Image (cartoon, grey):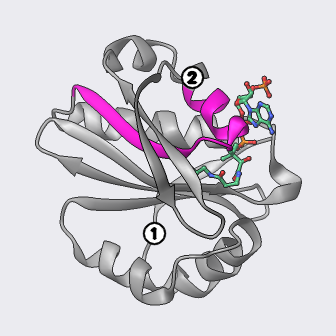
Amino acid sequence: MEITISEMTPDELPEVMELEREVFSWPWSEEMFMDEMGRDYSFIFLARDEAGLLVGFICFWMLIDEMHILNLGIRKRYRRLKIASKLTLEALKFCYMRGARAATLEVREKNKAAIKLYKSLGFEEAGFRRNYYESPRDNAVIMWLYDMQWVLEKSP
Ligand SMILES: CC(C)(COP(=O)(O)OP(=O)(O)OC[C@H]1O[C@@H](n2cnc3c(N)ncnc32)[C@H](O)[C@@H]1OP(=O)(O)O)[C@@H](O)C(=O)NCCC(=O)NCCS
């Protein structure tokens, strides 16, 4: 499937909220997305299919020489098509070009799909926060990618 990736603009917020509500049981609010768009170190990339349908997004921070992934979601019927991999690689490439040399994120310990995705992109489990998440309560796994260049060599 042909996927187009672009940076989110404020007029795309209603579509992003519809997707966010489909993907997460505790979705981000409109204000949270607006807050992220207002920070000069925060970026949201959107993935669309050939018909222009919004199928996924990633939100990340670019902080000096580190990238932090905050949120990533793919529409249910579009999963296992490497869209999350493409979005994450595009975001990693964007940050690497701006000086990032390592990337990190927190993920629910029970979210085996996301942990496997991040491992497939070179992230390693590097720490643990007990009862970090609410609703439902879960531990956080902290993951780091230390060799961004290696990942970018395999990016499209
Ligand atoms: C996790 C998520 C983002 C993955 O998106 P995706 O586009 O389906 O992922 P990809 O197709 O790029 O998957 C790449 C690899 O990750 C692993 N993976 C992804 N989903 C998986 C699943 N449900 N079960 C097992 N492995 C999985 C596989 O190794 C996969 O490669 P393969 O399909 O060749 O086996 C998606 O399932 C999602 O939106 N989940 C709900 C929101 C969420 O958990 N976000 C992450 C918050 S940190």
Residue at the image position 68 percent from the left and 43 percent from the top: 110
Q: Which of marks 1 and 2 is in front?
A: 2
Residue sitting nearer the eye, 136 or 14: 136
Residue at the image position 61 percent from the left and 33 percent from the top: 115
Q: Residue 85 appears at what percent x and percent y? A: 61, 34
**Furthest residue to the left?**
64
Residue at the image position 59 percent from the left and 37 percent from the top: 86
For label 2, the residue is 119
User: Within the magenta stretch, is there residue 108?
Assistant: yes
Amino acid type, label 2:
Lys
Find out if the beta carbon at label 2 lies less than 8 Å from the nearest ligand 1 atom: yes
Q: Residue 94 appears at what percent x and percent y? A: 33, 40
Task: Using the rendered image of the protein, determine whether residue 102 is visible from the camera's viewpoint.
Answer: yes
Which quadrant of the figure shows ligand 1?
Answer: top right
Magenta part of the chain: 101-118
Along the polypeptide, which appears first: circle 1 or circle 2?
1
Per the image, label 2 sits on a secondary structure element best described as: helix
Disc ID at residue 8 = 1
> Quarter of the image holding residue 129?
top left
Residue sitting nearer the eye, 73 or 25: 25
> Quarter of the image holding residue 97?
top left
Distance between the alpha carbons at the discs numbered 1 and 2: 26 Å
Per the image, label 1 sits on a secondary structure element best described as: loop
Amino acid type, label 1:
Met
Residue at the image position 83 percent from the left and 57 percent from the top: 76
